């Protein structure tokens, strides 16, 4: 039995300070405004606070896990993917680290589908573009390309080179 070599591993979260400030503002307002105007919170105020807190919790729990090894790519965008998604090297036509435009190419960050395929990303504009021999069921249909965002483009480029070298070596 052949052992699996891991070339790259990364876990990303939504860590942008501006995002957390933007999300905290409605929460603070939902508490402060009723307290300042009425002196207490009503049931509907608690509902607003609860929904805002739930969105903040969901974003805090989200994480994108990427692993590149000698058998393929494993990706998990928790909590949307309860189980990791594995893409075998046998079905991958190409892999390259590139700079892209998240808003223009995929409509933003998260689990996205755009004109250029599907994207799993949390921030930034660097990623690994994976091309498949056959279309894969990724987000909202079958796509032939998947952009996996990365905060470590240099390390991922090096890992791809090591993987290519290992595939050529006996």
Image: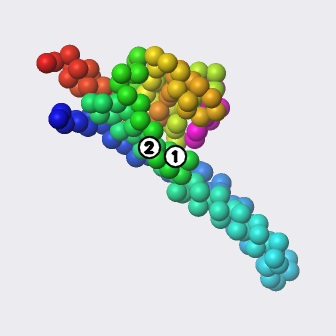
User: In this picture, is 168 found above or below 36?
Assistant: above
Residue 163 shows in the view:
yes
Instruction: Tell me which segment is drawn in magenta.
Output: 104-113
Q: Let me know if residue 148 is in the magenta part.
A: no
Element type at marker 1? loop
Q: Point out the image quarter for the N terminus.
A: top left
Q: Point out the image quarter for the C terminus.
A: top left
Percent x, y of residue 17: 54, 53
Q: Mark on residue 81?
A: 1
Residue drawn where x is 57% and y is 24% of the image: 143
Disc 1: CA contacts within 10 A as few (<14), some (14-19) or many (>=20): few
Q: Quadrant of residue 58?
A: bottom right
Residue drawn where x is 55% and y is 32% of the image: 138
Render colour scheme: rainbow
Residue farthest to the bottom, as pictured: 39
Q: Quadrant of residue 167?
A: top left
Left-right relation of 59 to 133:
right
Q: Let me know if residue 111 is in the magenta part.
A: yes
Residue farthest to the left, as pictured: 170
Q: Which residue is mark 2?
A: 84
Left-right relation of 1 to 93:
left
Residue farthest to the front, as pictured: 1
Q: How many marks overall?
A: 2
The reply to whether callout 2 and callout 1 are in contact (CB within 8 Å) is yes
């Amino acid at each position: 039995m052949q052992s699996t070599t891991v070339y790259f591993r990364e876990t990303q979260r939504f860590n942008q300070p501006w995002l957390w400030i933007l999300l905290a503002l409605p929460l603070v307002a939902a508490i402060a405004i009723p307290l300042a105007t009425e002196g207490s919170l009503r049931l509907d105020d608690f509902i607003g606070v609860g929904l805002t807190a739930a969105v903040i919790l969901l974003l805090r729990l989200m994480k994108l896990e990427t692993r590149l090894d000698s058998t393929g790519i494993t990706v998990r965008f928790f909590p949307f993917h309860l189980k990791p998604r594995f893409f075998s090297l046998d079905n991958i036509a190409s892999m390259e680290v590139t700079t892209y435009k998240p808003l223009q190419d995929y409509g933003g960050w998260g689990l996205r589908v755009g004109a250029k395929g599907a994207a799993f990303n949390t921030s930034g504009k660097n990623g690994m573009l994976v091309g498949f021999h056959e279309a894969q069921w990724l987000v909202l249909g079958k796509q032939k390309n998947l952009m996996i965002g990365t905060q470590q483009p240099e390390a991922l480029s090096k890992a791809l080179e090591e993987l290519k070298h290992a595939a050529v070596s006996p």
